Image (spheres, rainbow, N blue to C red):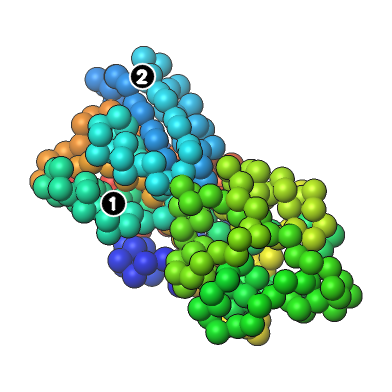
Amino acid sequence: MKAIKPSLIALSLSFAGTNYAAAQTVKVDPEIPSYKPTTGVTGNLNSVGSDTLNNLMALWTEGFKKAYPSVVTQVEGKGSSTAPPALIEGTAQLGPMSREMKATEIDEFEKKFGYKPTAIPVAIDALAFYVHKDNPIEGLSLKQLDSVFSSTYKRGGKPIATWGEAGLDKWGGKTMSLYGRNSASGTYGFVKKIVLQKGDYKATVKEQPGSSAVVQGVATDLAGIGYSGIGYRTSGVRALPLSETGGKYFEPNVENCLSGDYPLARFLLLYVNKKPGQPLDKLTQEFINYVLSKEGQEIVVKDKYFPLPAEVVKKHTATK
């Protein structure tokens, strides 16, 4: 997956060419085992972090509580940047993030604990650029998206302000209406890093407080375009096919994410405080085991994201 860090690609043990990637419908890898409840799991489980992962975390904790009714859970999803401080301060055991931690965030964590936080892939997302359902544009390249959303044009393009300039001739001079996230969002940071190549956003981007607000804004704005996780797609919008440099466009589906053809595929992550050589506390570990089980990954599909291949699951459940 081109947009996913090489360090994380290595964990996948190569997605392309597997039976999983060839599937026509989104299904959980049959090699992922079912979750088996155990004894002695109790206490309070707190999650602070990503808005993109907010629905998933709510669904996972709901399913987890069915196995362990005495566990008290709390989920807060105000943005990925809220996860590192919560882990450092000990106010949360789980830090869901839609991007990798920045070097400065890792440094702050390591300064306190003497080791780095542990990142666990829990789902695959196709970061999507949405347009109104009645917008007929075929697709866009990352260079065009940079020209639409950026004021610095790090990809070498020229400013694009109208749909005609983006290639939709029949809409001529119709001005594009831009929707995005605020700087607390991991998705904001992901787009800034990958699409804008660390450039600056235009001042005209309407910053929204959550992923659903971005999609809702585009759904009610014929000239709108905005970015959000694939799990927030609704009938009022269309997720654009994209290309890395132009030419053939690729739909944001599971096959194209796993093959690497869709350029904005990413892992969704859970960060935890795990001391090297020592196990996690039982409550946190069992929650992770549930998330990486057949039942947990079925919830990923239910929430319209893409489940992990068994190779990735095995990598992160091998040591308990």
Q: Residue at 42% x, 66% y: name it.
A: 4
Q: Which mark is residue 224?
A: none
Q: Nearer the viewer, mark 1 or mark 2?
A: 1
Location of residue 250 in the rendering, given as x and y in whole percent from the top left corner: 63, 72
Quarter holding residue 101:
bottom left
Q: Which residue is mark 2?
A: 71
Location of residue 234 in the rendering, given as x and y in whole percent from the top left corner: 72, 47
Quarter holding residue 296:
top left
Any part of residue 121 in sight: yes
Q: Which residue is mark 1?
A: 105
| Up/down of 41 relative to 94, above or below | above
| Mark 1 closeness class: few <14, some 14–19, many ≥20 residues within 10 Å | some
Sequence-first disc among 1 and 2: 2
Location of residue 109 in the rendering, given as x and y in whole percent from the top left corner: 21, 46
**Amino acid carrying mark 2 in the image:** Val
Q: Residue at 80% x, 76% y: name it.
A: 164
